[in-house]
Amino acid sequence: FSLQELHGIFPWLVESIFGSLDGIIVGWNLRCLQGRTNPNEYSVALDFLDPSGPMMKLVYKLQAEEYKYDFPVSYLPGPVKASIQEQVLPECSLYHNKVQFPSSGGLGLNLALNPFEYYMFYFANSLITQKNSPVTHHVSPSNSAYFILVDTYLKCFLPTEGSVLPPPSSNPGGAIPSPTPRSPAVPFSSYGMHHTSLLKRHIAHQPSVNADPASQEIWRSETLLQIFVEMWLHHYSLEMYQKMQSPHVKLEVLHYRLSISSKHHGSPAQSSYQALHAYQESFKPTEEHVLVVRLLVKHLHAFSNSLKPEPLSPSAHSHTASPLEEFKRVVIPRFVQEKLYIFLQHCFGHWPLDASFRAVLEMWLSYLQPWRYAPEKPPQSTEPLPRSVSEKWAAFIQENLLMYTKLFVGFLNRALRTDLVSPKNALMVFRVAKVFAQPNLAEMILKGEQLFLEPELVIPHRQHRLFMSPTLGGSFLSSRSPAVTDASFKVKSHVYSLEGQDFQYKQMFGTEVRNLVLKLAQLICQAQQTAKSISDHSAETMASQSFFSWFRFTPSDVNGSYTGNDLDEIGQDSIKKTDEYLEKALEYLCQIFKLSEAQLTQMMMKCGTAQDENGKKQLPDCIASENGLILTPLGRYQIINGLRRFELQYQGDTELQPIRSYENAALVRLLFRLSSALNERFADQMEVLCSRDDFVGRLCRYHLTNPQLIQKIRYSPVVRDKTSQNWGPRISLRFLASYRTLISLLMIYFLASWFYVGPVGCTFIILIGYFLYAVIMTFFFEGWKPHEH
């Protein structure tokens, strides 16, 4: 094919692979392509899209001719799209000099992208658009072709060792030129003093782009990272995030949403806050999206940590620093920190309260621990002691203080609303507590808070936002600029740049957060007691099961009470894991916040572990009223979290209970009709016999079911306006429909046949034996009814 022909089919080829931007065309569906299920297609796709594969060679071939391709602005993230449509230039240099008006008759704004940018935009966009593709089997995101390609591209263009491989060229000795600056096609205003890219700053004095091969590696690396961050993280602008932190705005937005839900489209709230929501799209990241972002975060830590140590001589540094080394130095604070913080804030506030939050949690914890991806190996030790966090990471912790403190408070608020008896939820609390309990980490976070709270003496308040604003390139990028020695100034600048000047900082080791930790510790104690009671109940149930449990014949439960929990289906091993996770989490929290043994003992006393006379858990917290028990807010909290429960028991006619799994449905219905016919025929005679005061009367009352003798139970908090019903003495033959009873009778008849006793004789012996047993029981336990065991 000629270059002109390749130029024409390139957009079609990219769309055929990654799918259309609107999601209608699925393409190769790389997210669901796995080597385990489709080995041939999987290997072909990876080879074709490899950084040195045919597709990338085509990209570089078109790149050499400086072809441009239109990418619709309408498919960019919400904040970028809104600012471009308002002719406000985004601060990211990726969009500079690329926005064009549509041609005559065209619709919408477009970005004029080079082949490499066009390819990577489609690749990154396929993660967030192809959400409704049909999946016929379970797909593991970390094993998909898309996930492997992301990892491959990161290792190729952001290498931790060596430099980026030069792009293949069809001309020997030639090089692919980096994109040249173009005149803006649309007059734009800007957010402020936007920075220049590392590439432009490095080659500003170069006579030719091709004269410096290092410029090629930094251009592709910076472009790849900017596209990934913009498409995957930039769905919530900093300005909108800061506005949404205002309590007044939160209240107004709540009114706005209520007006929308009520379909009052003409309400003033909609018009007044239409602009407020212009920058915020309906953004619901998936678990796969979060896993890919975590992969990006882990690789960026490894990439940044591979920075070579600075030489002692400043003059030597000025001659030896390469663009890639400078890029490693600024990659996280300049490109990732702000957008990832807002992305995490959005996930912490909007993610469902279920176990799928584990993906978000692990991504957050990966960012908090850059030392895990450092090249140096931990010293070998015979004792498995936790590794202490080195003091060299103090600067990172201080410059990311909100990542540690505010998001920790956000996690506490989530943990207080989850069921910690669940092993998955207990594991998440354990993971966070274990990370923050690493030696020396809590001290460095406390030091960062102290630096932020230091009184301002010299630095004007208005300069905080200006210093650390990402729109100023020189403060971040120039390695030759004077080093800022005021650590307090850096911490304050970080906090104010992300949260705004009016932000009221909540100390992680302050009284308010400490009270939240104490509440969590108390909740952990309660969850441990609940798990223990469930474990004891399960053990008792297993011990009480008879031989018939092998045939799924369990003892009948006439009242239908439910005393189990979801953990009954999980098993004893998971209950033990839950207890271990919670015990270790409580230990770590005590280490972090210096909780004393006296405080723990006091919490245990408040956990409500007192038991009633039967050894069962108490009822949920209630208030007695004329209409019965009314749940208090504490009682509702106890029920939601599985800490306490009501004993659910059947209150109606025992003959009309639902058919149980251990009963034969046909026999239940047949015996009910027979019992009803006998009760209707002999009702008067049974009433006369049961009304006698002699031994015959007591024997009849023992045999004939009387609902008035049912033991008193504790009602759930409902209106107790019940009309007492007395069905009178009656015959109940339902016990004969139980599989347990039937199997017992068959075994008795089978054993009797060994002694040459026929069915009639065996039946007579059973009746005589039961009569003698009933006479004895009548003397001692008149109230016990054999039909209800």
Image (tube, rainbow, N blue to C red):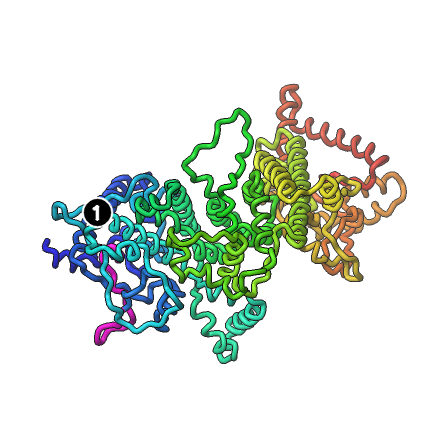
| Residue bearing mark 1 | 167
Looking at the picture, tell me which residue is in the foreground, 310 or 283: 310
Residue drawn where x is 81% and y is 43% of the image? 701
Question: Would residue 625 be visible to someone looking at this image?
Answer: yes
Side (left or right) of 677 relative to 777: left
Give, as a single range, the part of the protein colored magenta: 100-120
Badge 1 amino acid: Pro
Looking at the picture, tell me which residue is in the foreground, 452 or 576: 452
What x and y, as percent, mark residue 398? 52, 50
Looking at the picture, tell me which residue is in the foreground, 499 or 587: 499
**Residue furthest out toward the left:** 2
Q: Quadrant of residue 718?
A: bottom right
Answer above or below: position of 642 versus 764: below
Determine whether the residue tagged by mark 1 lies in a helix, strand or loop.
loop
Answer above or below: position of 199 versus 152: below
Q: Is residue 105 magenta?
A: yes
What x and y, as percent, mark residue 753? 63, 22
What x and y, as percent, mark residue 293? 41, 50
What x and y, as percent, mark residue 257? 52, 70
Q: Is residue 39 magenta?
A: no
Side (left or right) of 440 relative to 652: left
Q: Quadrant of residue 298?
A: top left
**Residue furthest out toward the top:** 755
Mark 1 surroundings: few (<14), some (14-19) or many (≥20) residues within 10 A: some
Q: Quadrant of the C terminus?
A: top right
Question: Would residue 731 be visible to someone looking at this image?
Answer: no
